Image (cartoon, rainbow, N blue to C red):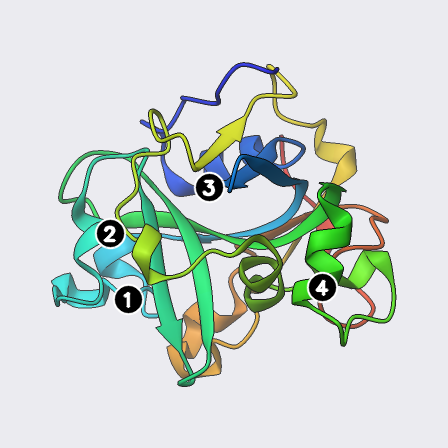
């Protein structure tokens, strides 16, 4: 078994890049459901108009964003979906990285059972709501300590971030309300990976 990823005391952009290529693991009933992280988005806290903590907003819903780095922030959206974020930085900084897509690797038959509408294996965890449905991640896991929990964590498959040439940076998806922040290249994905969400990817090579 790979060691746990534990480098959460980072700014969200650095963490977003380092999470690419690591493995998200969910254990239910003694069974592992897992996939390699291939797409993420960074949310920069109080100054970021797209972040749930913009302007220092603090509610029952986003309380987990204010925990220290290494906790999960899981929220419910559109009255039907869950999204999972990895909180980073210091306590009360309220910065996080949204996990947008996985390349599934373990427990695929169970993922198919949970997501029967998925046409291909590459679609099982293609999008933030798809991956939480496939892995069984919901609000019950909000606030989970990813450094110690036995049901949800991240495994380190790489000691260093992927080379810049393998990472594409684009604007985030679904944040048109955030004015100029909707155009900032804070979505990071593995170049050419078929499990990345959205349509054809157009972006630039991420800076090293």
Residue 186 location, x and y as percent? 52, 54
Query: Looking at the image, is mark 3 or mark 4 earlier in the sequence?
Result: 3
79 left or right of 33 in image: left
Toward which corner of the image does residue 45 lie, by quadrant?
Answer: bottom left
| Percent of width and height locating residue 193 | 82, 48
Q: Which image quarter: residue 152?
A: top left
Question: In terms of secondary structure, where does tag 4 sit?
Answer: helix
Residue designated by label 3: 13
Disc 1 to disc 3: CB gap under 8 Å: no
Q: Nearer the viewer, residue 26 or 11?
A: 26
Instruction: Give the residue number, with chain letter if any, for mark 2.
Output: 65
Residue drawn at (18%, 42%) of the image? 67
Residue at x 64%, y 64% (from the top left corner): 127
Q: Is residue 73 above or below residue 55?
A: above
- Tag count in the figure? 4
Marked residue nearer the N-terminal end (1 or 3): 3
Q: Earlier in the sequence, mark 3 or mark 2?
A: 3
Q: Which residue matches tag 4?
A: 113
Which of discs 3 and 2 lies nearer the camera? The answer is 2
Helix, strand or loop for disc 2: helix
Badge 2: residue crowd in 10 Å (few <14, some 14–19, many ≥20): many
User: In the rendered structure, are the residues bearing label 1 and label 4 in contact, judged by CB atoms less than 8 Å apart?
Assistant: no
Where does residue 65 sit, x and y in percent of width and height? 24, 51
Which badge, 2 or 1, is on the more N-terminal residue?
Answer: 1
Quadrant of the rendered image containing residue 105: top right
3D distance between C-alphas at marks 2 and 1: 8 Å
Q: Secondary structure at mark 1?
A: loop
How far apart in space, not on screen, are marks 3 and 2 (Cα)?
16 Å
- Distance between mark 1 and mark 3 Cα atoms: 16 Å
């Amino acid at each position: 078994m790979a060691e746990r990823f534990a480098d959460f005391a980072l700014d969200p952009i650095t963490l977003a890049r380092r999470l690419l290529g690591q493995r998200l693991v969910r254990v239910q009933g003694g069974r592992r459901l897992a996939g390699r992280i291939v797409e993420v988005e960074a949310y920069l806290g109080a100054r970021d108009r797209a972040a749930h903590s913009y302007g220092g907003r603090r509610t029952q819903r986003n309380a987990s964003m204010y925990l220290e780095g290494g906790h999960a922030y899981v929220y419910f959206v559109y009255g039907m979906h869950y999204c999972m974020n990895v909180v980073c930085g210091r306590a009360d900084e309220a910065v996080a990285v949204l996990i947008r897509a996985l390349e599934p690797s373990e427990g695929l038959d169970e993922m198919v059972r949970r997501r029967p509408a998925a046409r291909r294996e590459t679609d099982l965890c293609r999008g933030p709501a798809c991956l939480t449905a496939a892995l069984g991640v919901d609000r019950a896991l909000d606030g989970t300590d990813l450094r110690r929990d036995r049901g949800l964590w991240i495994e380190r498959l790489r000691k260093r971030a992927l080379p810049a040439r393998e990472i594409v940076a684009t604007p985030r998806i679904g944040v048109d309300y955030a004015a100029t922040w909707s155009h900032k290249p804070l979505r990071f994905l593995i170049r050419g990976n078929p499990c990345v969400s959205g349509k054809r990817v157009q972006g630039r090579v991420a800076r090293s």
